[in-house]
Image: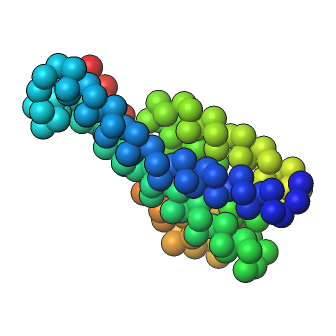
Amino acid sequence: MSEKLMNRMIYGVIILFCLTPFLFLFYMNITASMQSVTMVDLLQTTPVLTLQMLAIFLLPLAGYLIKLKWDKVQEEESQHIFYASIALLMIALFILNNVVHGLLLLILLFFVTKHFSISIKKAFATFKQPKFALATYSGEIFMLVVSIMIQLMMNRVM
C-alpha cells in the first residue's frame, strides 16, 4: 500500500470522527422537532441520550490523537506506538458500544499492519519496556478511563 493511500485513509477516518458529533446534533434536532420539544428538554428527559452525547463528543479527541500519532510516525520510526495507540482507542470505542467507529479503527489497524509490517507482539512490547513513558499513551488512557466511566453510568441509568 502506498504512502499516499495510507494518508488518505487516516485523514478520512479523522474527518469522519470529527464530523460525527455534528451528525449526532442533527439527529437530536430532528428528534426534538418530531416530539415538538426543545433539545434541552429532550436531554433532560432522556439521560441515556445525554450519556450517548458525551460518548459521541469524545470522537474528535480520538481523531486528534490519531493525527498526533500519525504525525509522529511521519517524523520518526514509531510505527509500533501508532499501532498500540489505535488499538487502545479501538478498545475504548468498543467499551462505549460504538461498534461502527470501533470496526473502522479495526480496519485501519489491519491496513496499518499491512503497510508497516508490524507484528502484534512488537507493537505491544512497548508496554513492557523499562523506559515506558506513560505520557506517550496518556490521551488513550484518558479515553479508556472516560469510556469506562460513561459505560458504568449507562449501566446505572438503564
> Is 148 left, or right, of 127 in this rendering?
left
Residue in view at x 51 percent, y 40 percent: 93
Residue in view at x 26 percent, y 25 percent: 31
- Foreground residue among 38 and 89: 38
> Is 70 left, or right, of 145 in this rendering?
right
**Height in image: 16 above or below 39?**
below
| Residue 141 x/y as whole percent | 48, 56
Q: Quadrant of residue 68?
A: bottom right
Placement of the N terminus among the 4 image quadrants: bottom right
| Residue 80 visible to an observer of this rendering | no
Q: Quadrant of residue 52?
A: top left
> Is 153 left, or right, of 8 in this rendering?
left
Residue in view at x 61 percent, y 50 percent: 13
| Residue 102 x/y as whole percent | 58, 38
| Residue 147 x/y as whole percent | 40, 43
Placement of the C terminus among the 4 image quadrants: top left
**Height in image: 33 above or below 52?**
above
Count of number-bearing discs: 0
- Foreground residue among 98 and 31: 31
